[in-house]
Each structure stands twice: as structure tokens, then as C-alpha cells.
Amino acid sequence: MILSAWGDAMKKRWKRAVMNWMFLDTYLHMHGNEELRLENCRRILEYHDLRVRLQTKDFIIEIWGKNLRVYDYSDNSVIVKGLISSVHLQEAR
């Protein structure tokens, strides 16, 4: 019984380590000022037609513009389309 609980704790610790390893880098791909693709996104914090806030492992990314829409939130990537006027990176705490 004790070994089983210890084994489960080790599995959880290794799973966290692997997940941290997989989410090391944030990749932003811009296509002009009308499309932004973000890889390794953890979650959408805020979503409006003027501002989208996204969280990655290391950053909070704020995208400002007009008629912003979020597409393809799957496999830890997000596509934001619209007229993008600025992108702001803030270190996550």
C-alpha cells in the first residue's frame, strides 16, 4: 500500500516535469497585422473584439486591435485574426 502511494506520487512528479519540459518556449508567428499564431498557450485569460489576453508558461501576451477573433484553440496553439495594432509581452509571476 505504501509503495503504491509512493509510486503514484512519483508518477505525478514526472508528469509535471515532462509537462514543464514540453512548455519551455513560446512561439509567436505573425502574418502581417491580420493574423497571429501562438504556440504553447496554456489558456485564454480574456477575449474581446479589442483585446485578447493569453497565458503561456513564462508570459502574459496582450493583443490589441479591432475585430479580434480567436480560432483553433487546440493542441496548445491559438490563432488570433483581426486588425492587430499591438502585441505586449509581460513576464508571468
Image (cartoon, rainbow, N blue to C red):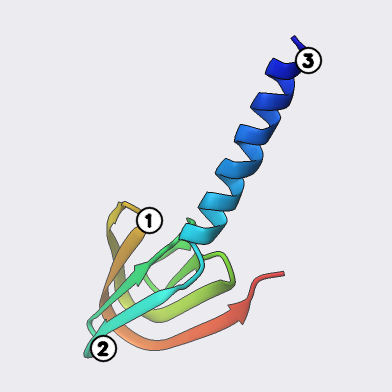
User: What element does badge 3 sit on?
Assistant: helix
Q: Is the residue marked by circle 1 packed among few (<14), some (14-19), or many (20+) residues within 10 Å?
A: some
- The mark found on residue 2 in the picture is 3
Q: Is the residue marked by circle 3 packed among few (<14), some (14-19), or many (20+) residues within 10 Å?
A: few
Nearer the observer, 8 or 57: 8
* Residue that numbered label 2 is attached to: 33
Q: Is residue 91 above or below residue 52?
A: below
Please identify, in this view, whether the residue under mark 3 or under mark 1 is nearer the observer.
Answer: 3
In this rendering, position of residue 11 left or right of residue 78: right
Q: Is residue 60 above or below residue 33?
A: above
In what quadrant of the picture does the C terminus appear?
A: bottom right
Q: Is residue 62 above or below residue 43?
A: below
Please identify, in this view, whether the residue under mark 2 or under mark 1 is nearer the observer.
Answer: 1
Residue 4 rendering spot, x and y as whole percentages: 68, 16
User: What element does badge 2 sit on?
Assistant: loop
**Marks 3/1: CA–CA distance:** 36 Å
Q: Amino acid at mark 1?
A: Asn
* Residue that numbered label 1 is attached to: 76
Nearer the observer, 21 or 79: 21
* Residue drawn at x 54%, y 82% as measured from the top left: 89
**Marks 2/1: CA–CA distance:** 22 Å
Decide if residue 45 is in sight here.
no
Label 3–label 1 contact, CB within 8 A:
no
* Residue drawn at x 57%, y 73% as measured from the top left: 59
Label 3–label 2 contact, CB within 8 A:
no
In this rendering, position of residue 54 left or right of residue 3: left
Residue 39 rendering spot, x and y as whole percentages: 36, 67
